[in-house]
Structures are given as structure tokens and as C-alpha cells.
């Protein structure tokens, strides 16, 4: 099993890919190491996201949910709203200005979940934060 390290705002998390989303995992894995910024969600609750505009990962729905648990990353492949990656740090009902959405759960954080409670407010009050995904 491939191990991942995800670093957000200087906080390191161990993570794993989800076998239930093989096409999403393969598409994202081809982008590693992946570096971007996270901003706080607008409609979904307690989450941070990477807005990706018209980016096309070439995947459709698999292992999709509108209610990711804290520590779960979902990839919304685009359609009625822009492509995005979202991380739940608390309660999330995934949505956009167009209404409820569903994204593919493809990565789960496996360590330092207690740090999620400080991550969300930091992004909310301090603004965009660096994020990096890498295989280890």
C-alpha cells in the first residue's frame, strides 16, 4: 500500500489512498507531488478546498459522497460546479451555489486528526494555506 504525506499549513498528516476510487486515485497519483493552496469552504460547512476551475481529471463518480467525514478528501470532477478537492475537518454537507454536490472519496488522513480542529479556523481567519501531497 502506498503511503502518503499531506502537509497543510505546516501540519504533517499521514494518509492513504482509497481502493474504492481506483480511477480517481490513478488520475491524482499521476499529478504527485501535488502542491497548491487551500481556502475555507463557502457553502459546505467545516471544510477546506482547492478550487480547480475547469481542470479535468478524466474521471466520473466513484465512491462518491456528499458527507465526507473529518479527515476525508473528496474530488468533485466538475459538471454543474467547478472541479475541486475538499477536505472535511468537521461536519460537511458538500454543496455549491448550485446546490448539493457529491465528490469521490479518494484519500483519508490516518494521523494527527486532532490537528484538524486547529486547521479549519486557521484557514478561515488567516486565509489561504499551502498544501502538499507526496508519496513516501
Image: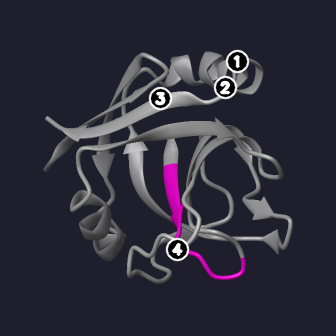
Point 31% across, 61% down: residue:
28
- The circle drawn on residue 123 is 2
Q: Which residue is mark 4?
A: 77
Callout 1 environment at 10 Å: few (<14), some (14 to 19), or many (20+)?
few
Tell me the SS state at disc 4. Answer: loop
Residue 22 drawn above or below residue 68: below
Q: Are marks 3 and 2 in contact (CB under 8 Å)?
A: no
What residue is pinned by disc 3? 130
Q: Earlier in the sequence, mark 1 or mark 4?
A: 4
Real-space Cα distance between discs 4 and 2? 23 Å
Q: Could you classify mark 4 by the number of other residues whose Cα lies within 10 Å: few (under 14), some (14-19), or many (20 or more)? A: many
Residue 14, x across and y down, in percent = 31, 30
Secondary element at image label 1: helix
Nearer the observer, 60 or 97:
97
Farthest residue in the front direction?
A: 54
Q: Quadrant of residue 100?
A: bottom right
Contact? badges 4 and 3 (CB < 8 Å):
no
The image shows residue 2 at horizontal and vertical percentages of: 15, 48
Amino acid at each position: 500500500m502506498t503511503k502518503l504525506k499531506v502537509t497543510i499549513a505546516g501540519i504533517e498528516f499521514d494518509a492513504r489512498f482509497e481502493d474504492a476510487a481506483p480511477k480517481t486515485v490513478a488520475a491524482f497519483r499521476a499529478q504527485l507531488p501535488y502542491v497548491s493552496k487551500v481556502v475555507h469552504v463557502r457553502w459546505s460547512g467545516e471544510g477546506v478546498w482547492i478550487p480547480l476551475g475547469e481542470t479535468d481529471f478524466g474521471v466520473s463518480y466513484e465512491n462518491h459522497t456528499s458527507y465526507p467525514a473529518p479527515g476525508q478528501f473528496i474530488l468533485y470532477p466538475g459538471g454543474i460546479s467547478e472541479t475541486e478537492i475538499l477536505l472535511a475537518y468537521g461536519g460537511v454537507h458538500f454543496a455549491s451555489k448550485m446546490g448539493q454536490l457529491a465528490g469521490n472519496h479518494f484519500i483519508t488522513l490516518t494521523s494527527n486528526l486532532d490537528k484538524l480542529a486547529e486547521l479549519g479556523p486557521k484557514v478561515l481567519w488567516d486565509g489561504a494555506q499551502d498544501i502538499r501531497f507526496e508519496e513516501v
